[in-house]
Image: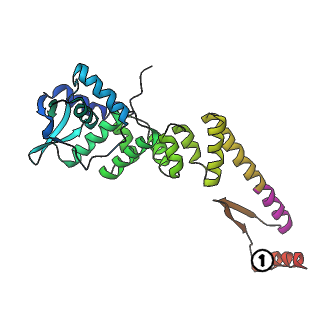
Amino acid sequence: MLKKDPLGRGLSAILQDVEERGSSRLIPIEQIIPNPEQPRIAMREETILELATSIQEKGLLQPILLRRKDGKYEIIAGERRYRASLKAGLKEVPAIIKDVDDKEALELALTENLQREDLNPVEVAMVYEKFLKEFDYTQEDLAKKIGIDRSSISNFIRLLKLPEWIKDLMRNGKLTQGHGRVLTSLKSEREQKRFVDRVLKEGISVRELEREVKKKKAQRNSSFTFVEETLRDVLKTKVNITYRKNKGKIIIEFYSKDDLERIMSIFSEKDE
């Protein structure tokens, strides 16, 4: 099965165009420096070692994208290949030199992160958020640019609002993006923990989690409905209950001063 491109057919064309049309040249590896301003996506040491072994056997087949900076060559895209080349003991690497400003360099770096790495859902969300903040895109603009649905952008971004311990579980592959999306609909961290424990202990699927969360909400709403109906019957007026984050409000409507006094008299009767 082909791996789905997280960039759709939009931004992935940027790097492909640069690499296909740009002419590479050998650059001494000692003249190459990482860009400290580039977004850092976690790189697993074992994958770098695997790539280093492949480079030792076959060489670096894909050039690194660089720009000139202060007499050196700063990495735009390809830091993973650069690190692996260092471990493989290469003295020089094939590279394409691109004349870009800081903003263009960051956009290409973000694109490379999405396209090249096996990102977990939290990392994808962080890259999307970086695009929105650094380039002032709306979610709609970004969705069009990278060729995916706006709702997908929104669902990923919402993951960043989850507690850090839940995001760590997604980073480690113990929860999927789908599980995280369902958990974002729960306002209480206590509730989130209860459902996360079930996922980890029982291995319930995203669909099962959705059903369980909907069932829980329906039960909670039905209990409020019963209280509302009881209060309406007693007070003979409209009553509305709102609930959020384990607290809420009871709103009792009255339509005149006499009506308010009537309602108050009911409470007085209950106190006697």
| Front residue of this view, candidates 159 and 266 | 159
Query: On the image, which quarter does residue 123 sit in?
Result: top left
Residue at the spot of label 1: 260
Of residue 55 and residue 111, the one placed in the foreground of this image is 55
The verdict on residue 235 being magenta is yes
Which residue is at the front of the view, 216 or 152?
Answer: 216
- Residue 52, x across and y down, in percent: 28, 28
In the displayed structure image, the side of residue 87 where residue 91 appears, left or right: left
Q: What's under tag 1, amino acid-wise? A: Leu
The magenta span reads 224-236
**The N terminus is located in which quarter?**
top left
Return the x and y of residue 47 as percentages of the image width and height: 36, 31
Q: Quadrant of residue 29?
A: top left
Q: Residues within 10 Å of mark 1 (few under 14, many from 20)?
A: few
Q: Is residue 80 visible?
A: yes
Q: Is residue 54 left or right of residue 197?
A: left
